[in-house]
Image: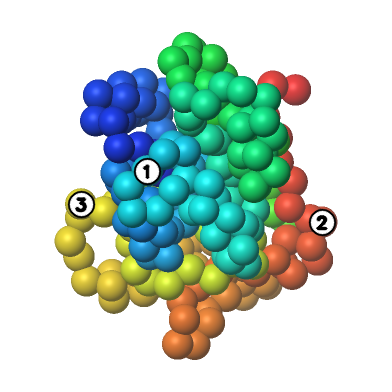
Amino acid sequence: MSTRILVVEDEEPLTLLLRYNLEAEGYKVDSVVRGDEAEVRLREQIPDLVLLDWMLPGLSGIELCRRIRARRETERLPVIMLTARGEEGDRVRGLATGADDYIVKPFSVPELLARVRALLRRTKPAHIANLLVAGDIELDRETHRVRRAGRELHLGPTEFRLLEFLMQSPGRVFTREQLLDGVWGHDVYIDERTVDVHVGRLRKAINTRETLDPIRTVRGAGYSFDETFAKGEGGLGLSTGTD
């Protein structure tokens, strides 16, 4: 499952350049050209990282960054600011507003990609780890295998992606619409009740009468991977798979 990056940039050639290179790295990219459009998009769906231009129509990048940090849902959202302003005072202002990193135009694409990887590694390790571990459940992204208490489980591709998506954010409740976007993608038009069917299949595949169900149903809201399951069974662990 790809890490999602929102590009907020009003220069179309630069947006196309960023999209091409980010998608080549395996990221899923969305883009908007106005700051106010970006604010609306962030209320609809929270990406894993934002590349944010300083000068934007509608709402400046600086103001949008302030609003991102002011919302509880996005206060920890990684933000890299892109700008032609290279003076020290401007860099300090951008970082003081809440940006995690600051890149001056024109910039090296390999350097930007390296900074994206470094920021994700620091702030969202689950999105770059090869092995997700929660309690007695292990999900290996490289081999597409899932084990529970050492026993290999047989999951379909959709159930695998669904479990992976939920395990990345233990405790967070996702609506059916958010799960559809995160697991199936924006361009797939299926009924939200399809989520219920696949959650049922996932539960059947990973649970037995003797085991705890790590997937929590939140009535009227959606589903989450129960953080108390992860803590009670030994905690959520992340491994790069390089040991």
User: Looking at the image, which residue sits at the far left?
Assistant: 189
Determine if residue 150 is in view: no
User: Which residue position holds label 2?
Assistant: 234
The amino acid type, in three-letter code, at marker 1 is Leu
Q: Position of residue 107 (x, y in %)?
A: 47, 15
Q: Which residue is located at x 49 percent, y 53 percent?
A: 64
- Residue 51 in picture, x, y percent from top left: 46, 37
Query: In the figure, is residue 210 to the left or right of 8?
Result: right
Q: Which residue is mark 3?
A: 187
Near mark 2 (Cα within 10 A), the count class, few <14, some 14-19 or many ≥20, is: few
Q: Quadrant of residue 216?
A: bottom right
The count of marks equals 3
The residues tagged by marks 2 and 3 sit, at their Cα atoms, a distance apart of: 38 Å
Q: Label 1, label 2: how many angstroms apart (C-alpha)?
A: 46 Å
Task: Tell me if mark 3 has few (under 14), some (14-19) or many (20+) residues whose alpha carbon lies within 10 angstroms of its own.
Answer: few
* Residue that appears at 48% across and 68% down: 174
Q: Is residue 228 above or below residue 51?
A: below
Q: Nearer the viewer, mark 1 or mark 3?
A: 1
N-term mark: 1 or 2: 1
| Location of residue 95 with respect to 23 vertically, above or below | below
Task: Report helix, strand or loop for mark 2.
Answer: loop
Q: Secondary structure at mark 1?
A: loop
Q: Please indicate, yes or no, whether residue 35 appears anywhere in the rendered image.
A: yes
The residue carrying pointer 1 sits among few (fewer than 14), some (14 to 19) or many (20 or more) residues within 10 Å by Cα, namely some
> What residue is pinned by disc 1?
56
User: Three-letter amino acid code at disc 3?
Assistant: Asp
Residue 164 percent across, percent down from the top left: 51, 50
Name the residue type under label 2: Gly
- Picture quadrant of residue 178: bottom left
Q: Is residue 3 above or below residue 90?
A: below
